[in-house]
């Protein structure tokens, strides 16, 4: 067997090996995004307003080095004493995931508008991108928007530039913190929830509550214990 | 924004901007231009953070030139870059169905624009040189299989500058980084016209001064091996096919 024939044999083996390698890569490429189950140090409802229609859930993993991967989330259950129940999930407080580029706060952005622009005139536009205005400063005016879905935050925030009267849009800043610095707890998890006054409609993506209801957030720890947080709807 | 933050951002964006290697022809797993003088190739690659699509046209024979353009998009950051690239290389026959391929390349990638709603635009300039080795593993009447590997060294310079209301109060910055890129591919040529070529690429020895924790070079994790595919059509025909 001459050198060329031997080399051709090697190339054929390489062909088969590469096919196997590519098959493996495809398996990895199309693997589904999953859930993560970190041990939580605490979980809490930090804000609930039926006026704005927003509830915030925040959680802190016990291991501060914990980071969710791209497409990962932490499953939680939200129950309401009047009967509603929603399966939801926690995501990182700080984006992007994994951290790259300029960091920003997940689920939120701010915009500025020309004087005279009203909160009411933009509410429909905000709802159209799956969010709600949590804070409105009429001196400016400036709106602070909370989004209820994790995906496409930047693209959806960019749409605000086309709203009537809007002059600027910015993502929530992480200040001058960068990954590795101590000024931000980078492992922090969060989830804003869309809240409405109404009869219970379980698993419709909206938390239906009544005044005086008790809202409970539940998370099953890796060891099986259930971490909970409660608040009463004002 | 702090200078450190800006620097790391540039380095992170390098990944969004860097073009997939053209490395057209034999050492990228595509048929030699000895049979068909023109080749139109569409490429797609999926990375952890981004998806890259490209289209290129190659002409020549032993020595060839390639012009290409594309789009690399990071959906989470709503950031896209548009690379325009040029490459000159040679398919040097060194034996029966074996080729050695020196190549030099240059590219400018435009964007992303208004990155993360920051009113900063970006541009990258990438230049590199490399060498490849390829061989025809299977040669038949209807099917040829080409196995190829290559490695190249490159330097990329990223520049950003403020726009809009920030143009008057902020300044831009440039930063350069070096990297190596290895590729391995298998091209299946059918009917001497259509070639389907899956392949993998692997960036390594990526250097950047601000630390690895922010960097996502090449739109992927550092040292991430990623999969791409090319579909190529040979155009025109020379008088007599030789291999």
Image (tube, rainbow, N blue to C red):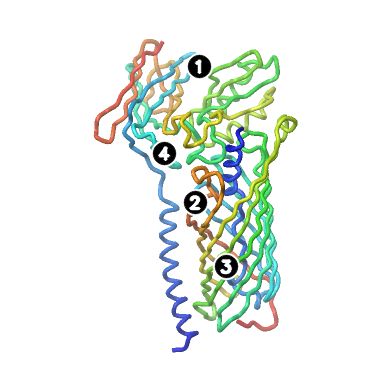
Q: Residue furthest front?
A: B209
- Residues at circles 2 and 4 in contact by the CB criterion of under 8 Å: no
**Residue B119: x %, y % from top left:** 67, 34
- Asked if disc 2 and disc 3 are in contact, CB closer than 8 Å, the reply is no
- Residue at 51 percent across and 51 percent down: it is B47
Residue of label 4: A68
Q: Residue at x 56, y 45 (%)?
A: B12
Q: Quadrant for the C terminus of chain A, please.
A: top left
Q: Front-most of B36 and B108? A: B108
Task: Give SS at disc 4.
Answer: loop
Q: CA distance from mark 2 to mark 3?
A: 22 Å
Q: Say which residue label 1 marks.
A: A52
Are labels 1 and 4 assigned to the same chain?
yes
- SS at circle 1: loop
Give the labeled residue for mark 2: B222
Give me the chain letter of mark 1.
A
Do pointers 3 and 4 mark residues of a single chain? no
Q: Is residue A202 left or right of residue A149?
A: left
The disc placed on residue B28 is: 3
State how far apart marks 1 and 2 are (Cα): 42 Å
The x and y percentages for residue B90 are 65, 73
Work out whether A149 lies above or below A48. below
Q: What chain does mark 4 sit on?
A: A
On residue B166, the disc is none
For the residues carrying marks 2 and 4, which lies nearer the camera in this image? 2
Give the alpha-carbon distance from disc 2 to disc 4, as whole Å.
17 Å
Location of residue A32 with respect to A22 vertically, above or below: above
The alpha-carbon separation of the residues under discs 3 and 1 comes to: 57 Å
Mark pair 3, 4: CA separation:
36 Å
Disc 1 vs disc 2: which is toward the camera?
A: 2
């Amino acid at each position: 067997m001459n050198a060329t024939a031997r080399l051709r044999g090697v190339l054929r083996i390489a062909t088969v090996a590469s096919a196997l390698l590519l098959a493996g890569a495809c398996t990895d490429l199309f693997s589904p995004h999953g859930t993560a189950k970190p041990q939580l140090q605490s979980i809490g409802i930090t804000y609930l307003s039926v006026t704005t229609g927003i509830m915030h859930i925040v959680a802190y993993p016990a291991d501060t080095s914990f980071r969710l991967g791209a497409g990962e989330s932490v499953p939680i259950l939200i129950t309401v004493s009047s009967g509603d129940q929603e399966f939801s999930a926690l995501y990182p407080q700080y984006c992007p995931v994994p951290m790259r580029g300029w960091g920003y706060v997940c689920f939120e952005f701010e915009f500025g508008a020309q004087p005279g622009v009203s909160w009411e005139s933009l509410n429909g536009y905000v709802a159209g991108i799956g969010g709600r205005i949590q804070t409105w400063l009429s001196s400016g005016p400036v709106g602070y928007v909370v989004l209820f879905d994790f995906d496409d935050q930047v693209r959806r925030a960019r749409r605000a530039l086309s709203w009537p009267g809007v002059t600027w849009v910015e993502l929530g800043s992480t200040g001058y913190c960068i990954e590795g610095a101590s000024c931000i707890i980078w492992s922090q998890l969060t989830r804003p929830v869309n809240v409405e006054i109404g009869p219970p409609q379980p698993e419709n993506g909206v938390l239906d509550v009544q005044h005086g209801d008790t809202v409970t957030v539940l998370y099953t720890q890796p060891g099986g214990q259930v971490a909970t947080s409660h608040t009463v709807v004002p | 924004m702090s200078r450190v933050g800006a620097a790391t951002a540039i380095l992170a964006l390098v990944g969004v901007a860097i073009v997939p290697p053209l490395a057209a022809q034999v050492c990228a797993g595509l048929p030699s231009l000895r049979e068909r003088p023109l080749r139109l190739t569409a490429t797609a690659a999926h990375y952890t953070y981004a998806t890259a699509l490209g289209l290129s046209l190659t002409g020549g024979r032993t020595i060839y030139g390639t012009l290409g353009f594309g789009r690399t998009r990071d959906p989470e950051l709503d950031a896209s870059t548009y690379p325009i690239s040029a490459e000159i290389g040679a398919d040097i026959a060194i034996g029966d169905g074996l080729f050695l391929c020196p190549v030099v390349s240059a590219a400018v990638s435009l964007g992303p624009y208004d990155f993360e709603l920051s009113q900063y635009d970006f541009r990258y300039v990438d230049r590199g040189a490399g060498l490849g080795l390829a061989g025809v593993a299977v040669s038949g009447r209807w099917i040829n299989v080409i196995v190829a590997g290559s490695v190249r060294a490159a330097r990329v310079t990223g520049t950003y500058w403020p726009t809009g209301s920030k143009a008057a109060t902020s300044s831009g910055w440039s930063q350069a980084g070096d990297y190596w890129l290895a590729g391995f591919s298998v091209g299946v040529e059918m009917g001497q016209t259509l070639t389907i070529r899956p392949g993998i690429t692997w960036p390594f020895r990526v250097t950047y001064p601000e630390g690895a924790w922010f960097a996502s070079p090449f739109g992927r994790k550092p040292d991430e091996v990623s999969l791409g595919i090319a579909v190529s059509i040979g155009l025109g025909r020379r008088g007599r096919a030789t291999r």
